[in-house]
Image: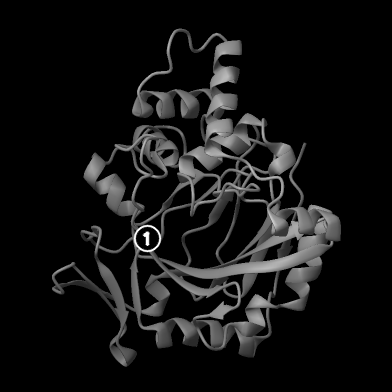
């Protein structure tokens, strides 16, 4: 079944779109979206999104292989992120019009079929020339299970397993683009991982609202410059007025300088979507929450039912890899 989504062009008024660029400039410093610490006892030696990372290193963004070495592949996907709003905490003055955008609220209800929409977060991503984003699905939430309490790869596995649908909190995601870089199209698979890959240009003041928790998606390579600089954990991208954006190593030494037209700048909005007040109340009062033990036991039982696992449960790292390998099926190759 084809995923429900809606593209919006233009997305905001010209003045509002310009404000989105100014917000990034006023934020000034963007830091890399480094992997978070790992949860004790559940695959401690693995990155939070090892599912997408390992698939990208092996297959690249198009499923046909990756010619980069592991270090370069990691740097290509080590993009820059800053949070603009999280719940009632507005961290970037001027983003309020985006956070509570009337069209977003209406479209989210329309696309998800759940009319009670609660905005949750707004964040911005910047990709430098030569960067791209691995094909993946976003981190979902369930009652009692979110990224603050459990590993991201586990939450993604839970969704793809289909075993916890009654606990899932549907989330609508809007991805919008501002700026003039001609590359970095939004690649997605609305017909599922075995379906045709489609792409939407990252054109200034356009957007798409879609269930990115279920639909595989990524970012095609941003138009490269003459060389691809090192972008390691701890690198910064700093706006310096008319001099543009300075890319610096963790020690502060500059390695490249860019103008707005060199960068891919997107703002993402996520909102919880409920069918009615009763569904919202069940989420809010936490009376029917999942526990980690229940989640792991349920997944283990399914592995045994499928004949994938016999004997005792393996060590945490091996168990994590077995879960991801069994339940998450990435698109195999780029469709024509």
| Residue at 62% across, 30% down | 161
The image quadrant of residue 336 is top right
**Observer able to see residue 64:** yes
Residue 41 vs residue 326, the one in the foreground? 41
Q: Position of residue 153 (x, y in %)?
A: 47, 40
Quarter of the image for the N terminus: give it: top right
322 sits left or right of 246 in the view: right
294 sits left or right of 111 in the view: left
**Observer able to see residue 276:** no
The image quadrant of residue 163 is top right
Q: Position of residue 297 (x, y in %)?
A: 55, 25
| Residue at 61% across, 48% down | 144
- Give the SS element for disc 1: loop
The image quadrant of residue 111 is bottom right
82 sits left or right of 334 in the view: left
Residue under numbered circle 1: 33
10 Å crowding of disc 1: few (<14), some (14-19), many (20+): some
Residue 152 vs residue 235, the one in the foreground? 152
Residue 233 vs residue 245, the one in the foreground? 233
Q: Position of residue 254 (x, y in %)?
A: 17, 74
Q: Please determine whether, in this image, residue 14 is positioned above or below residue 217.
A: below
């Amino acid at each position: 079944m084809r995923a429900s989504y809606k593209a919006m062009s233009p997305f905001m008024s010209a003045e509002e779109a310009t404000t989105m660029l100014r917000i990034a400039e006023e934020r000034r410093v963007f830091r890399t979206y480094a992997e978070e610490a790992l949860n004790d006892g559940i695959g401690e030696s693995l990155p939070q999104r090892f599912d997408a990372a390992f698939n990208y290193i092996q297959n690249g963004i198009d499923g046909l292989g990756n010619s980069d070495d592991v270090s370069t592949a990691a740097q290509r996907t080590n993009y820059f992120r800053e949070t603009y709003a999280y719940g009632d905490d507005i961290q970037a003055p001027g983003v309020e019009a985006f956070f509570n955008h009337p069209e977003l609220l209406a479209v989210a209800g329309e696309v998800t079929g759940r009319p009670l929409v609660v905005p949750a977060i707004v964040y911005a991503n910047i990709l430098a020339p030569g960067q791209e984003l691995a094909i993946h699905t976003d981190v979902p939430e369930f009652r009692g299970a979110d990224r603050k309490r459990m590993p991201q790869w586990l939450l993604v596995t839970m969704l793809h397993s289909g075993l916890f649908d009654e606990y899932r909190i549907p989330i609508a995601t809007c991805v919008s683009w501002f700026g003039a870089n001609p590359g970095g199209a939004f690649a997605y698979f609305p017909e599922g991982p075995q379906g045709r890959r489609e792409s939407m240009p990252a054109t200034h003041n356009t957007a798409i609202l879609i269930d990115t928790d279920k639909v595989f998606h990524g970012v095609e390579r941003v138009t490269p410059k003459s060389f691809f600089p090192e972008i390691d954990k701890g690198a910064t991208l700093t706006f310096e007025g008319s001099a543009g954006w300075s890319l610096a190593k963790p020690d502060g030494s500059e390695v490249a300088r860019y103008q707005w037209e060199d960068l891919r700048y997107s703002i993402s909005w996520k909102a919880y979507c409920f069918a009615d007040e009763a569904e919202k109340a069940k989420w809010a009062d936490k009376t029917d929450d999942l526990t980690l033990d229940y989640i792991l036991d349920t997944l283990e039982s399914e592995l045994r039912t499928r004949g994938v696992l016999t004997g005792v449960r393996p060590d945490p790292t091996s168990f994590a890899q077995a879960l991801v390998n069994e339940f998450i099926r990435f698109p195999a190759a780029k469709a024509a």
